Image (cartoon, grey):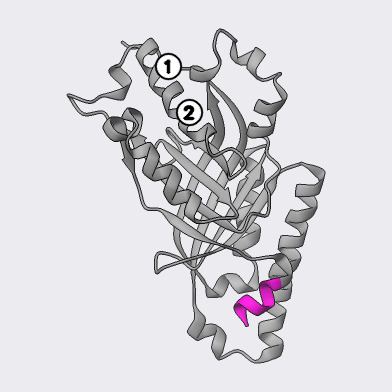
Amino acid sequence: MSEPVSTIDGWYSLHLLYSVDWAGLRVLGKDERNALTDELQAFLNRQEEVHEKHEGDYAFYNIMGHKADIIMWLLRPTADELIKLELEINKLRIADYLIPTYSYVSIIEMSSYLGGNKTPEEMMQIPHIQQRLYPSLEKSKYICFYPMDKKRDLDDNWYMLPMDERKQLMRDHGMIGRKYAGKIKQYITGSQGLDKYEWAVTLLSDDMLEFKKIIYEMRFDETSARYGVFGDFYVGGHIPNDAIADYFG
């Protein structure tokens, strides 16, 4: 048996994606539609208060293409908080016009591959690692979200590689990501036993082109080229809280 890598874990994560029933919204009167959007905006404003207190976080984006219309990303210290939060969303009146298309349950994580000789407990004391595990999300213009696995084929089985080889591959992989510091914020969430894939990646940037650049460059890295398996990509633009009425109007 190969040696498992240890992880340090942060906030629980829930990505919720919906299509909007535009036809249903169009038949509503202006006052009724305003009541729906006002309630949603109040909900999002409460999430902003949580963000300011650093007790969790959220992001709300309009997805391009037909896979979904909107994505809501929620972060909380516990799974129970996310369960209650999802129920709160489902009870909003506008939920009658939101058709679930995809969801993803995971936990922000960092592996000890890049920790050198430090233990997970020692890594937890490093400020920049704490910031990655318990982030304060920026209101970047664009989001890119996708799930992924590592291969378990007979010839290319990530989990059968020796620890030292996996460490080196992940260090090389991580060096590419560092080149995009200041251009992209990257969040890795682990989901083994929680969802269909093993990880999800959420990227935030003010330039959508940077998503294409980093992912294309990583395709030539052995970790991705040989062992990476990717799900659908969801890309979109930020919807400010004060623009909710315009978006659904």
- In the rendered image, the vertical position of residue 110 relative to residue 29, given as above or below: above
Residue 203 percent across, percent down from the top left: 53, 46
Residue displayed at 71% across by 66% down: 241
Q: Residue furthest left?
A: 154
Q: Are marks 1 and 2 in contact (CB under 8 Å)?
A: no
Instruction: Please name the predominant secondary structure of the magenta segment in the image.
Output: helix
Q: Which residue is mark 1?
A: 167
Whether residue 147 sits left or right of residue 71 in the image: it is: left
Circle 1 sits in a helix, a strand or a loop, which is it? helix
Whether residue 17 sits left or right of residue 65 in the image: it is: right
Q: Which mark is residue 174?
A: 2
Q: Which residues are magenta?
A: 243-249
Residue 183 percent across, percent down from the top left: 58, 45
Q: Is residue 247 magenta?
A: yes
Residue displayed at 66% across by 79% down: 246
Q: Is residue 5 visible?
A: yes
Say which quarter of the image contains residue 129: top right
- In the rendered image, the vertical position of residue 239 relative to residue 221, given as above or below: below
- Which one is earlier in the sequence, the residue at label 1 or at label 2? 1
Whether residue 13 sits left or right of residue 47 in the image: it is: left
Q: Residues within 10 Å of mark 2 (few under 14, many from 20)?
A: some
Residue 134 percent across, percent down from the top left: 68, 35
Q: Quadrant of the C terminus?
A: bottom right
Residue displayed at 64% across by 73% down: 93
Residue 53 percent across, percent down from the top left: 82, 44
Residue type marked 1: Lys
Q: Residues within 10 Å of mark 1 (few under 14, many from 20)?
A: some
Residue type marked 2: Gly
